[in-house]
Image (cartoon, grey):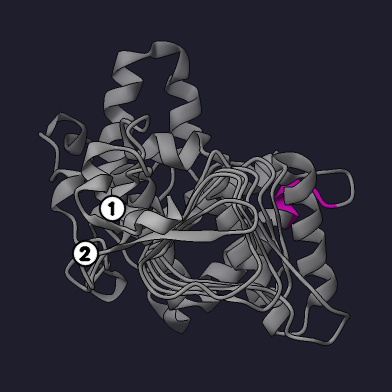
Amino acid sequence: TAEAAPSLEVGGAEQSSGTPTERRDGPEQSARSPPLRHEDIDLSIPPSVYDPDRGVDLVWDLMKHEARVEAEREPLLVSFLHSTILNHPTLESALSFHLANKLSAPAMISTQLMALIRGALDSSPEYRRTIRADMLAVRDRDPACTCLPDVFLYFKGFHALQTHRAAHILWKTGRRVLAHYLQSQVSQCLQIDIHPNATLGSGIMLDHGTGIVVGETAVVGHNCSILHHVTLGGSGKKGVDRHPKIGDGVLLGAGASVLGNVKVGDGCQVGAGTLVISDLPPRAVAVGVPAKIIGKYAEVSAQPAVGMDQVGSKEADSSIMFYMEGI
């Protein structure tokens, strides 16, 4: 397995070639109160939340604090929490270490994978910022998630998404064989299949994750929530733009299938088991096989992916204008 970074307790930084600052914290931090609550962190990850040039990384600070709390609460996990989180100087270091150990195989050992993923992270400031948005999206939307280490360590949807982001960078820089290798490992180990060419925005939650399939020319907007067994599938032959285009703030329920080069507008909600084969206008609520629009969110800024209120709940019903003929 890849070796964790040694524990560091003295200040220092390295900013050459645009890579993240290696922020190092003293031993006194474990005794401090929480640096802040996750609810107080701006989910858009502005420079006030993450700015490696100034040594600002609120998400990493909070995750380390919560990991220390968990280590004190559960002694059996002390070694695990230190090797995966607390011994690392940055979130990027910890993530590349953790993913490498999850996806290693005889064909590519963990140290090679760790270097590959870390290289992708160091090459893309946007990737580094998006990691933090994705992590906070899960923490904010999933009531089963109690702390940031939960997301980082145990949520395979998050693991698959971050590995896809590394594979996407490899794909776009011409290293397509390696990108396909990462896709294959994620599919085999995590049961989530995302083509390296697919484009996924920031602040995405892949909830549960099992069985999600995202095709080669698919595009997913920002702040979307995708539940297990969702398919963004193609219609047509190779070389054709043949996969769905999903807008911002969209909620795709468990088992939903969106097939072909169709557009799902911003703020749409697609119910569990729905088959979408034609465009949906912004803020539409659609259910059935094939999909039928039964309502529309009243607010222009509606983002059902953030609220995670399923159709039929009191909260969701109060914000949806239902069409009688659609029910």
The residue under label 2 is 49
The residue under label 1 is 59
Q: Which residue is drawn at 41% across and 34% down?
A: 150
Badge 1: residue crowd in 10 Å (few <14, some 14–19, many ≥20): many
Whether the residues at callouts 2 and 1 have beta carbons within 8 Å, the answer is yes
Q: Foreground residue, 154 or 305?
A: 305
Q: Is residue 110 magenta?
A: yes
Residue 220 image offset from top left, x and y in percent: 53, 70
Question: Considering only order in the chain, which callout, 1 or 2, is on the residue closer to the N terminus?
Answer: 2
Question: Of helix, strand and loop, which one carries label 2?
Answer: loop
Q: Which residue is drawn at 48% across and 23% down?
A: 79
Q: Foreground residue, 61 or 146?
A: 146
Q: Is residue 159 above or below residue 284?
A: above
Tell me the amino acid under the disc marked 2.
Val
Return the mark for residue 102: none
Separation of marks 2 and 1 at Cα, in angstroms:
7 Å
Residue range in magenta is 108-112
Q: In this view, does 177 lie above or below 186?
A: below
Residue 294 image-quadrant placement: bottom left
Tell me the amino acid under the disc marked 1.
Val
The main secondary structure of the magenta stretch is: helix
Residue projecting furthest to the front: 325
